[in-house]
Amino acid sequence: MEPEVRIADLVPEDGDAVVQAAELLVEGFREYWPEAWPDLDSALAEVRESFAPDRISLAARDPEGRVVGWIGGIRQYDGLVWELHPLVVHAAHRRRGIARALVAALERRTADAGGITLWLGSDDMSGQTSLGGVDLYPDVLGHLARIRNLRDHPYEVYQRLGFVITGVMPDASGPGRPDLFLAKRIGGDRAG
């Protein structure tokens, strides 16, 4: 289904939209990663960081102009690689294609800027996957090969958007709390 949203740059001069994006972060990560942005001040700091020159910040707005989704991109590896960070969609607007539209817009922008790869990290803070809550050592790759989604972890959403799992960092956020890495080619010629 085609989302009824307009995607455009989120700019610091639009104070209401900045606050709405920050509120989305707090609400959107509260259940599975509450430490990420526990309050509006920490979320506002994240949104403001997205206005740096080496970043892209895009908002999805509903027909009334409210921010219902937000995505950011961080330039890395001399612009050949971009990190998708963060992505959030308001709970009442999920499963309507907004995340897909935001990711597609970020892919276009980063490819236009010379990007070849778009990547992201997606933590498992609460045992949402078979990688969480276990000691991944010494068979990290074996655990990764057998990954299962136990409680609605977003990695499968990213896979449906064309991302592939490229790795995992065991204990990234503490014992049994790994960070799953996914990436997608967005531009450039394929390696021979």
Image (cartoon, rainbow, N blue to C red):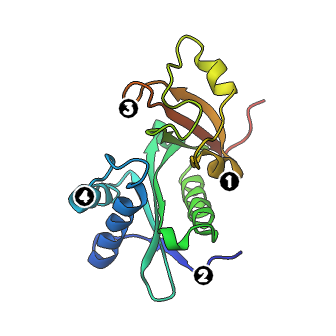
- What amino acid does circle 2 point to? Glu
**Quadrant in the picture for the N terminus:** bottom right
Kindly identify which numbered label has been placed on residue 4: 2
| Rendered image quadrant of residue 16 | bottom left
Name which of mark 2 and mark 3 comes first in the sequence: 2
**Quadrant in the picture for the C terminus:** top right
- Residue 186 in sight: no
The residue that label 4 is drawn on is 39
Name which of mark 1 and mark 3 comes first in the sequence: 1
How far, Cα to Cα, is label 4 from label 1?
A: 30 Å
In the displayed structure, 67 sits above or below 112; it is below
How far, Cα to Cα, is label 1 from label 3?
A: 25 Å
Q: Residue furthest top?
A: 138
Kindly identify which numbered label has been placed on residue 173: 3
- What amino acid does circle 3 point to? Ser
In terms of secondary structure, where does tag 3 sit?
loop
Name which of mark 1 and mark 2 comes first in the sequence: 2
Residue nearer the viewer, 142 or 21: 142
From the top left corner, tell me how far across and down residue 171 is, in percent.
42, 25
In terms of secondary structure, where does tag 4 sit?
loop
In terms of secondary structure, where does tag 2 sit?
loop
Mark 4 and 3 residues: CB-CB less than 8 Å, in contact?
no
Q: Residues within 10 Å of mark 4 (few under 14, many from 20)?
A: some
The residue that label 1 is drawn on is 161
From the top left corner, tell me how far across and down residue 93 is, in percent.
54, 73
